[in-house]
Image (cartoon, rainbow, N blue to C red):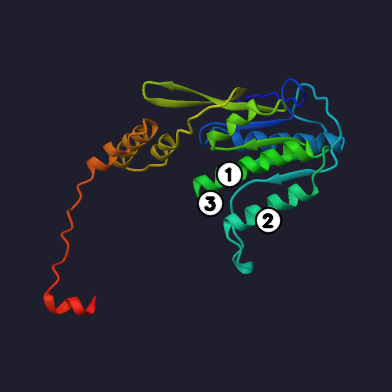
């Protein structure tokens, strides 16, 4: 069955939507859907909606997917930044911006920092209607700084140790991505999945020492230095 979701950009529901949720929960599908419906409406086509009211946009900008350009020597992250730069330099307050996991192509800290700064810039300097899907849960703090930023998430239900995707957009952010569960669905061996859950629990409890204690480390004895070697050091 097709699951419907509403979207509204205004002072109450926010102009900039940060969307969090599990892998495979439908975040990317949802934000692409909004772009496609907007395009269909603007060319005068029928739209898959019970009703729709919208303002004309001057452009629809999208940064989705992950790829590289070997011919030009552009890595996945470089290409991601080039496309994002094009959006930032050309979007206006009448544009629709769709951003899917910007910053994921680099380290976590760098990724969060870049994503955070991009959101601030769009809100402060552009004011475009924006959908920003991310796994960086730190970003949900931005709705406390900006009235125009609102958090949304894709709902899931945990039942008997299983995760059931609802594919429904709800208010508020979430701090879980259920990546280990997706790994299990993909066929990763149970031993790895079980161990990943243990490590995840340790990370969530800020108790990395438990993880380290499980690893059997060999004590490396320092090499003895003979007297005749001293002059060479």
Which numbered tag is attached to residue 35?
A: none
Q: Is residue 23 left or right of residue 115?
A: left
217 left or right of 158? left
Question: Which of label 3 and label 1 is nearer to you?
Answer: 1
Q: Which residue is mark 1?
A: 113
How far separated are the C-alphas under marks 2 and 1?
A: 17 Å
Q: Nearer the viewer, residue 137 or 222?
A: 222
Q: Is residue 44 left or right of residue 156?
A: right
**Looking at the image, is 150 positioned above or below residue 223?**
above
Give residue 148's quadrant in the image.
top right
Q: Secondary structure at mark 1?
A: helix
Q: Residues within 10 Å of mark 3 (few under 14, many from 20)?
A: some
Q: CA distance from mark 2 to mark 3?
A: 14 Å
Which x, y percent locates residue 172? 59, 23
Q: Which residue is mark 3?
A: 106
Query: Between 109 and 180, which is closer to the camera in this rendering?
Result: 109
Q: Earlier in the sequence, mark 3 or mark 1?
A: 3
Q: Please state which of residues 185 and 91 is positioned toward the viewer in this rendering.
A: 91
In this picture, is 135 found above or below 5? below
Residue drawn at (64%, 67%), measured in percent from left and top? 72
Residue 216 at x, y percent in the picture:
19, 47
Residue found at x 78% / y 30%: 47
Q: Quadrant of residue 57?
A: top right
Report if residue 2 is visible in the image.
Answer: no
- What residue did someone put label 2 on? 82
């Amino acid at each position: 069955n097709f699951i419907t979701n509403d979207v509204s950009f205004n002072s109450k529901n926010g102009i900039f939507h940060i969307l969090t949720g599990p892998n495979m929960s439908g975040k990317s599908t949802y934000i692409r859907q909004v772009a496609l419906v907007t395009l269909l409406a603007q060319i005068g086509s029928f739209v898959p909606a019970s009703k729709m009211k919208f303002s004309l946009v001057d452009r629809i900008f999208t940064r989705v997917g992950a790829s590289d350009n070997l011919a030009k020597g552009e890595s996945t992250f470089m290409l991601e930044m080039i496309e994002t730069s094009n959006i930032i330099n050309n979007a206006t307050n009448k544009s629709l911006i769709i951003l899917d996991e910007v910053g994921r192509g680099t380290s976590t800290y760098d990724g969060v920092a870049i994503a955070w700064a991009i959101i601030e810039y769009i809100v402060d300097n552009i004011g475009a209607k924006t959908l920003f899907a991310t796994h960086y849960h730190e970003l949900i703090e931005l709705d406390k700084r900006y009235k125009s930023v609102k958090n949304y998430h894709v709902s899931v239900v945990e039942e008997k140790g299983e995760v059931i995707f609802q594919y429904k957009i709800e208010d508020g952010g979430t701090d879980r991505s259920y990546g280990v569960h997706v790994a299990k669905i993909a066929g990763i061996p149970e031993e790895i999945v079980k161990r990943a859950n243990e490590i995840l629990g340790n990370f969530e409890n800020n108790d990395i020492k438990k993880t380290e204690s499980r690893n059997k480390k060999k004590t490396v004895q320092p090499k003895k230095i003979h007297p005749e070697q001293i002059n060479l050091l």
